[in-house]
């Protein structure tokens, strides 16, 4: 890059001075227009060359051709025709070679590597421009202008030799058929991709603005200098802007990247061009305003703006990036240049090509450029999200004629699962009338249940006779299904048959339907109900379960007293059925019973839904249970997730208030996770200050524990206590980082933070780089600019870097916190508040047999009563 831009700057100096000196500024518009047309042909040939040889070899061949052609122009006479040809040739070189170089570089690196390397590459390019401009200015004192072309040709040969020596890059040849197939795939992939469209808009606006700024400067310079003076001015000017470009790249780019990120860098140049255009209009095209406008473009285009542009393209899929950028930065850019040149030519012809008029056109283009760049943030995050984890939307199922035939055919299958699936499809598509009543004779009870549920609807009666026959079926489940369906249409015969059945479950349904018109008091006093409740053993389990199933299915609140009686059952199956029934018949009297059930794994999800169904009384009771110290620990641990199920702002307030004062680590974790669930699933706004504080605290805990554990991780002791201590410390470090990402997810509920977390900690270098870029962009909102949140972005990004522990902590600026010795590290871990971690550290300390550590552990045991059951002093004796 250094050599290419040094050569191009020297040839550009000769080109511009010869062209303006022999043709004048009035011919610029024609030159722009012809250059655009010739470039389209040349780029088509270049694309063919890339397909045949690969990007590396094609770039080398193009550089050799550039050297030969440039040196040939050095021997031509100084006349308008030769100068015109040199202008077109030099313009082609600047277009093709630079585009080829950056496309070649874009295929070699991940986002993280590009972010690290593209800056220095662009900086060396700025150095090359500075060297070329400075050398041209010095050489013009002793050489003719044409001699600069010979030196430029030699500078083109040097990078071609470097590329020829590069054997690491092996690129397969791409055949024309593959190209056409990829192009058809790209059309489908690009359609609707607003991010790619925005990047294309940026490129188009930048191209048009650059041409207008170039015209402004050359027009003003042609009016102020003769041919020799032009050469000196152009050399000085190129040297000045190259120096500024280098300064921006070496100093400014790094500072900008830290302060404003990639998106802020991409916004800098359009804003300056907009300001320059306005200045040109207001000052009537003053030379200073024109020079500053072109200077902003020349100093930033190939430094800050180029790096930002390359990074903006990195999250785009490889095939889209390769298939879109090359035609965009070749053919499309030339078309834009042609249109801009045609506009300038029209203005020249009409006599309106004054500097203020051109400046006004520049203002309009720069305004579109600025607005597009300013609105890029959300699209950029979305593209990073897709690059981290690509999701293919599941298309909606359409039931056409052929599909309908297949579904109906599946109804006659022997596979019960297939039949049930067909029934569900017809019901979902509102075609239950297509279900034949013969399905009720299917040997699978599950099929019969699904079919009967779909058929027993108002206006259809063909199912009734076949269902009545099921009352005598050998399977009690079939009899229960038939009884329920017939009872709903007041079939007294079916109810009596149920009461007389031998199976207690069928009898339970018969009892339920026989009392459909009784009051709540009559139900509780009914002898049949009393008998059912008193049933024990397997018959009692069946009877209770089926009675609760009947109550749940109908949602009948008259049976609440019976449900309260059954809540005393020791049988888990009965309790699970009861919980399901409470969901349909929520009553505040069940709150204490349900909260107590949170400590039991069985039916916990159903218990939460039941509490949510009860509503405000349940939420108040849960808040009280969370605050009370006498609430059983296992119950209290599951209260936060239960509160989150309510999905309300009040629930978020309860969780947030408790998070501030909660001392227990496990409960704090559940509280934070519950708040994140509310933010993501229920779209409830959670106090950002609280979440930011949690994020900062857990990132601090992550780095603190990592610093303390470095000597432990570097120690090769494989004793049991050492392995266990390393394991638990690593778990604690991972937990702290996981909690930080949970807080970040709650702060940004619409973003795929958990997927980004997996990418950042995964093995895929490209996904990790895109995840880090996502975090970098996301954490540049004003929220993170608060003084107390300083360092959040840096810590999050360093988590994803492939670094050793010491280097990671050095980058974080806390390497001084690393203990000097293993003994110091173990001693500090033994003082941790976490009892389990401290106990493991204590055991390992005693195994190390260091007197100072043994004394420290004995002192800790005296001060911490919780250590007494662990018997560390006795362990010390055993170790000796």
Image (cartoon, helix red, strand yellow):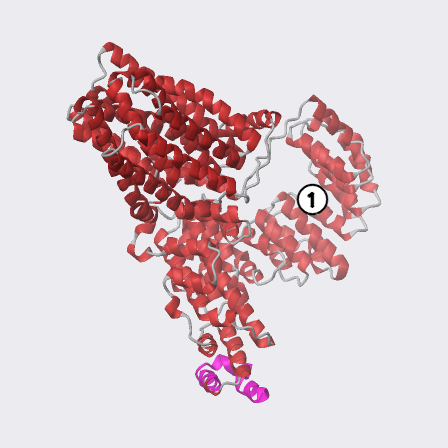
As for residue 865 lying within the magenta part, the answer is: yes
- The residue under label 1 is 513
| Residue 527 image point, x, y percent | 70, 55
Above or below for 399 versus 774: above
Place residue 225 in its image quadrant.
top left
| Residue 592 image point, x, y percent | 53, 61
Q: Secondary structure at mark 1?
A: helix
Q: Is residue 65 left or right of residue 293?
A: right
Residue visible at 58% across and 53% down in the picture: 605
Residue visible at 49% across and 59% down in the picture: 670
- Mark 1, Cα crowd under 10 Å, few <14 / some 14-19 / many 20+, is many
Q: Give the residues drawn in magenta, as a range.
A: 853-880
Comparing 2 with 474, the one in front is: 2
Place residue 628 in its image quadrant.
bottom left
| Residue 93 image point, x, y percent | 40, 28
| Residue 589 image point, x, y percent | 53, 57
Comparing 213 with 467, the one in front is: 213
Above or below for 254 versus 42: below
Q: Is residue 23 left or right of residue 631?
A: left
Indicate the quadrant containing the N terminus: top left, top right, bottom left or bottom right.
top left
């Amino acid at each position: 890059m250094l050599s290419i831009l040094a050569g191009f700057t020297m040839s550009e100096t000769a080109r511009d001075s010869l062209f303006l000196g022999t043709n004048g500024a009035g011919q610029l518009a024609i030159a722009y227009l012809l250059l655009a047309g010739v470039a389209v042909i040349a780029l088509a040939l270049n694309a063919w060359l890339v397909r045949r040889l690969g990007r590396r070899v094609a770039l080398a061949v193009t550089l050799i051709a550039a050297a030969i052609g440039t040196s040939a122009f050095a021997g031509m006479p100084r006349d308008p025709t030769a100068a015109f040809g040199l202008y077109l040739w030099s313009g082609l070189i600047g277009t093709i070679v630079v585009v080829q170089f950056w496309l070649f570089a874009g295929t070699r690196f991940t986002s993280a590597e590009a972010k690290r390397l593209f800056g220095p590459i662009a900086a060396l390019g700025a150095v090359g421009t500075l060297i070329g401009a400075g050398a041209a200015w010095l050489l013009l004192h002793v050489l003719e202008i044409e001699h600069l072309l010979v030196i430029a040709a030699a500078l083109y040969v040097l990078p071609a030799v470097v590329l020829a020596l590069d054997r690491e890059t092996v690129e397969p040849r791409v055949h024309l058929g593959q190209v056409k197939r990829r192009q058809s795939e790209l059309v489908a992939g690009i359609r609707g991709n607003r991010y790619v469209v925005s990047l294309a808009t940026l490129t188009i606006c930048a191209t048009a603005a650059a041409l207008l700024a170039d015209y402004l400067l050359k027009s003003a310079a042609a009016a102020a200098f003769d041919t020799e003076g032009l050469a000196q001015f152009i050399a000085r000017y190129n040297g000045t802007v190259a120096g500024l470009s280098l300064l921006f790249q070496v100093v400014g780019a790094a500072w900008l990247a830290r302060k404003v990120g990639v998106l802020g860098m991409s916004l800098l140049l359009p804003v300056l061009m907009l300001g320059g255009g306005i200045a040109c209009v207001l000052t009537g095209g003053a030379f200073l305003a024109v020079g500053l406008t072109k200077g902003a473009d020349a100093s930033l285009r190939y430094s800050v703006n180029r790096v930002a542009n390359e990074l903006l393209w990195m999250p785009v899929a490889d095939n889209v990036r390769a298939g879109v950028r090359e035609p965009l930065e070749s053919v499309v850019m030339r078309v834009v240049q042609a249109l801009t040149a045609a506009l300038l030519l029209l203005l020249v012809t009409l006599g309106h090509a004054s500097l203020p008029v051109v400046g006004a056109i520049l203002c309009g283009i720069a305004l579109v450029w600025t607005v597009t760049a300013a609105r890029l943030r959300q699209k950029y995050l979305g593209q990073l999200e897709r690059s981290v984890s690509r999701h293919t939307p599941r298309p909606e199922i359409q039931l056409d004629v052929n599909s309908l035939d297949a579904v109906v055919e599946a109804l006659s299958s022997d596979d019960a699962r297939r039949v049930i699936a067909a029934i569900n499809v017809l019901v979902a598509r509102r075609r239950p009338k297509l279900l034949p009543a013969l399905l009720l004779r299917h040997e699978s009870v599950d099929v019969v249940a699904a079919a009967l549920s779909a058929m027993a609807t108002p206006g259809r009666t063909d199912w009734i006779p076949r269902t009545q026959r099921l009352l005598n079926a050998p399977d009690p489940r079939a009899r229960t299904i038939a009884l329920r369906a017939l009872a709903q249409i007041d079939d007294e015969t079916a109810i009596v048959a149920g009461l007389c059945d031998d199976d207690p479950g069928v009898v339970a349904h018969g009892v339920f339907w026989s009392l459909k018109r009784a009051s709540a008091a009559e139900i509780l006093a009914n002898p049949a109900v009393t008998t059912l409740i008193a049933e024990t053993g397997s018959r009692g389990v069946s009877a209770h379960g089926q009675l609760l199933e009947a109550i749940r299915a109908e949602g009948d609140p008259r049976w609440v007293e019976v449900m309260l009686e059954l809540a005393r059952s020791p049988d888990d199956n009965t309790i699970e059925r009861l919980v399901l029934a409470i969901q349909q018949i929520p009553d505040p009297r069940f709150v204490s019973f349900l909260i107590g059930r949170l400590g039991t794994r069985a039916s916990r999800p159903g218990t939460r839904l039941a509490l949510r169904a009860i509503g405000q009384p349940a939420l108040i009771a849960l808040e009280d249970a969370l605050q009370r110290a006498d609430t059983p620990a296992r119950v209290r641990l599951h209260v936060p997730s239960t509160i989150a199920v309510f999905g309300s702002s009040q629930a978020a307030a309860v969780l947030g208030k408790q998070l501030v004062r909660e001392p227990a680590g496990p409960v704090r974790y559940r509280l934070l996770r519950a708040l994140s669930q509310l933010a993501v699933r229920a779209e409830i706004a959670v106090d950002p200050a609280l979440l930011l504080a949690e994020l900062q605290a857990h990132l601090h805990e992550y780095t603190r524990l990592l610093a303390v554990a470095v000597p432990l991780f570097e120690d090769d002791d494989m004793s049991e206590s050492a392995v266990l201590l390393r394991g638990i410390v690593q778990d604690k470090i991972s937990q702290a980082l996981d909690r930080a990402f949970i807080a970040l997810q709650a702060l940004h509920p619409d973003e795929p933070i958990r997927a980004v977390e997996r990418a950042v900690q995964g093995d895929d270098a490209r996904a990790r780089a895109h995840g880090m870029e996502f975090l970098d962009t996301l954490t540049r909102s004003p929220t993170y600019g608060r003084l107390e949140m300083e360092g959040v972005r840096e810590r999050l990004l360093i988590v994803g870097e492939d670094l050793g522990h010491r280097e990671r902590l050095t980058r974080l600026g806390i390497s001084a916190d690393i203990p000097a010795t293993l003994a110091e590290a173990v001693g500090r871990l033994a003082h941790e508040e976490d009892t389990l971690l401290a106990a493991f550290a204590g055991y390992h300390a005693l195994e190390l047999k260091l007197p100072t550590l043994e004394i420290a552990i004995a002192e800790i045991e005296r001060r911490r009563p919780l250590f007494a059951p662990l018997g560390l002093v006795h362990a010390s004796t055993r170790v000796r």
